[in-house]
């Protein structure tokens, strides 16, 4: 779950960076990263203005003043990218579930499904198996290849 959230936040960081580069190019100025709070205000003003009273009324007023204000004033692109990397590392490496051993790629059939090897008869004519047609008298002599 942390890796998915990291992926989403990293996508937001890339989108914010692209927005900054396009705006700087259009205005002919240097790239200046906007703070996270300004992006949040532009995207959804109501949620940002309602977050402070919710935190203060639920007993987390001290979280708003030092921590949330500091986060909202950070430049969006580097802060979101660093946060995404931290979440990606917290998510850890995915572990694969143990799977049964694979069969050989050259012979995927079970022992019951395998065909018996073609046998040679005493006359030098191969036995007619399901993949080999029986030789007729008109086909000519069969030569052994060495």
Image (cartoon, helix red, strand yellow):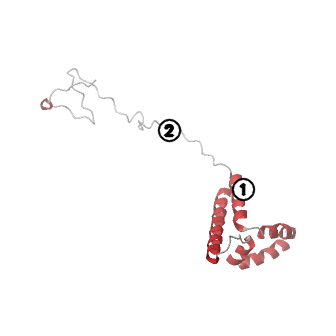
Question: In the image, 57: left or right of 111?
Answer: right
Image point (56%, 41%), residue name = 99
Label 2: element kind? loop
Question: In the image, 30: left or right of 103?
Answer: right
Label 1: element kind? helix
Q: Residues within 10 Å of mark 1 (few under 14, many from 20)?
A: some
* Distance Cα–Cα, label 2 vs label 1: 36 Å
Relative to 33, does residue 138 appear above or below in the rendering?
above
User: Which residue in the protein does label 2 denote?
Assistant: 102
Q: Residues within 10 Å of mark 2 (few under 14, many from 20)?
A: few
Relative to 126, does residue 65 appear above or below in the rendering?
below
Residue 137 appears at what percent x and percent y? 13, 29
Image point (26%, 25%), residue name = 145
Q: Nearer the viewer, residue 60 or 22?
A: 22
- Give the foreground label among 2 and 1: 1
Dividing the picture into quadrants, the one containing residue 52 is bottom right
Q: Are marks 2 and 1 in contact (CB under 8 Å)?
A: no
Residue occupying the far top of the picture: 122
The answer to whether residue 59 shows anywhere in this view is: no
Image point (69%, 59%), residue name = 84
Q: Quadrant of the N terminus?
A: bottom right
Q: Nearer the viewer, residue 85 or 23?
A: 23
Question: In the image, 93: left or right of 122?
Answer: right
Q: Nearer the viewer, residue 113 or 61?
A: 61
The answer to whether residue 69 shows anywhere in this view is: yes
Dividing the picture into quadrants, the one containing residue 41 is bottom right
Q: Quadrant of the C terminus?
A: top left
Question: In the image, 35: left or right of 27?
Answer: right
Residue 10 appears at what percent x and percent y? 65, 62
User: Which residue in the protein does label 1 denote?
Assistant: 86
Counting residues from the start of the chain, the first of labels 2 and 1 encountered is 1
Residue 49 appears at what percent x and percent y? 77, 78
């Amino acid at each position: 779950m942390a890796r998915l959230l990291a992926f989403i936040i990293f996508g937001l960081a890339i989108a914010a960076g692209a927005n900054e580069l396009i705006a700087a190019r259009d205005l002919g100025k240097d790239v200046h990263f906007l703070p996270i709070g300004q992006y949040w205000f532009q995207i959804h003003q109501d949620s940002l203005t309602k977050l402070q009273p919710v935190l203060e009324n639920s007993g987390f007023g001290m979280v708003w003043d030092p921590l949330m204000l500091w986060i909202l004033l950070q430049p969006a692109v580097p802060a979101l990218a660093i946060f995404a990397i931290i979440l990606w590392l917290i998510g850890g490496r995915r572990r694969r579930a143990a799977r049964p051993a694979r069969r050989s790629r050259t012979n995927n059939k079970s022992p019951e499904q395998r065909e018996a090897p073609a046998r040679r008869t005493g006359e030098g004519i191969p036995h007619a198996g399901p993949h080999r047609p029986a030789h007729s008298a008109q086909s000519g002599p069969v030569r052994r290849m060495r």
